[in-house]
């Protein structure tokens, strides 16, 4: 386990999955969900090379069928430490025999964590070291304790989005998405949390690539977390239903689950990213804790 620390925050990152597992402030309360398997066994997995689920858990590429389960394989792979200081670390995952059996591309996935005062910045770099076109999706899935430090109940918490607007919501017909039938979600005012919000799975907002900040806070104290996204096309808000789970995830996505009418061909996949040979793709988000 990797520890990052400054005068305000203490952070733990697991080399397995390059997963953020803990962020504690001065009062020693953890902001990050602690992976109780009764509800959800993960903390903040990385989603690569797909986000969500493929139709029938498979896809076809260049005439060959590949099997891959929900959210891809990065969350279950051992990353290597490339560089580390007291306040920052970079981890790397590259193709190996296990990944090539599911995903026939060479790649380098770098994940960089860095502390700046009350903020933790997470940056992803996807590199295509080959000559061929690379197709991929990418996402983050951080879970946050609700309630935080025992303050109030789930329904005392809310999510506020900036800029305030009515956002295009992409419905899910679990486990698939339905981008052809968009709805509307009003974030001109804060969204109060309740478990029924998630009866149809995650709330997925189409951000259209604009810079967006989502703040998770409560009516009982001044503690919370803000997640700032730059050029993320989508963000998911999720808590498992019908479980009364004491956490909520706010998930920046550079990709989306297969639509209900997906062809199954990777080249046709909705919201897929295309990366030319010897090029790189950068994305990320920032977490501010208060």
Image: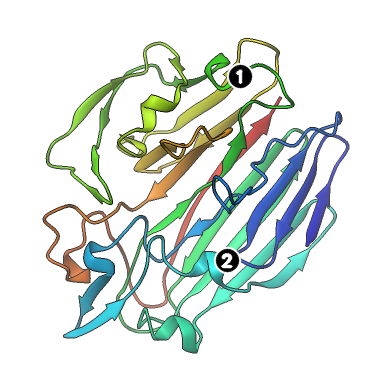
Give the quadrant of residue 54. Answer: bottom left
Label 1, on which residue?
153
Residue at the (28%, 80%) spot, across then down: 66
- Say if 266 sits above or below 236 in the image: below
Label 2, on which residue?
110
Task: Residue 174: give x, y in percent of width and height.
Answer: 27, 47
- Binning the other alpha carbons within 10 Å of mark 2 as few (below 14), some (14 to 19) or many (20 upward) gives many
Task: Residue 263: give x, y in percent of width and height.
Answer: 12, 65
- Say if 66 sits above or below 199 in the image: below
For mark 1, give the secondary structure.
loop
Residue at the (30%, 51%) spot, across then down: 256
Which of the labelled discs sits on residue 54, or is there none?
none
Image quadrant in which the C terminus is located: top right
Residue at the (61%, 19%) spot, across then down: 153
Mark 2 vs 1, N-terminal side: 2
Give the quadrant of residue 79. Answer: bottom right
Image quadrant in which the N terminus is located: bottom right
Out of 88 and 252, give the one closest to the viewer: 252
- Say if 252 sits above or below 92 in the image: above
Label 2 and label 1: CA atoms lie apart by 37 Å
- Say if 162 sits above or below 137 in the image: above
141 relative position to 270: left or right: right
């Amino acid at each position: 386990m990797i520890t990052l620390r400054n005068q305000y925050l203490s952070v733990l990152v697991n080399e397995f999955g390059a997963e953020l597992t803990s962020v504690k402030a001065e009062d020693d309360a953890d902001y990050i969900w602690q992976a109780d398997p009764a509800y959800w066994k993960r903390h903040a997995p990385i989603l690569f090379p797909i986000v969500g689920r493929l139709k029938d858990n498979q896809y076809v590429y260049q005439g060959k069928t590949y099997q891959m389960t929900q959210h891809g394989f990065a969350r279950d792979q051992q990353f290597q430490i490339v560089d580390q200081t007291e306040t920052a670390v970079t981890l790397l995952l590259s193709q190996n025999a296990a990944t090539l059996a599911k995903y026939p591309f060479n790649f380098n996935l770098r994940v960089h964590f860095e502390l700046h005062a009350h903020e933790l910045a997470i940056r992803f770099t996807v590199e295509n070291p080959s000559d061929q076109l690379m197709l991929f999706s990418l996402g983050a899935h951080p879970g946050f304790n609700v309630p935080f430090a025992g303050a109030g109940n789930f329904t005392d918490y809310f999510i506020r989005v900036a800029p305030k607007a009515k956002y295009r919501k992409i419905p899910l017909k679990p486990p698939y998405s339905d981008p052809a039938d968009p709805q509307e979600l009003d974030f001109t005012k804060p969204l109060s949390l309740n478990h029924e919000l998630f009866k149809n799975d995650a709330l997925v907002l189409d951000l259209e690539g604009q810079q967006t900040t989502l703040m998770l806070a409560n009516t009982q104290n001044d503690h919370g977390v803000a997640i700032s996204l730059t050029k993320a096309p989508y963000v998911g808000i999720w808590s498992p239903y019908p479980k009364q789970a004491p956490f909520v995830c706010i998930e920046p996505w550079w990709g989306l689950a297969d639509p209900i009418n997906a062809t199954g061909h990777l080249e046709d996949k909705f919201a897929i990213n295309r990366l030319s040979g010897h090029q790189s793709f950068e994305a990320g988000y920032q977490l501010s804790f208060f």
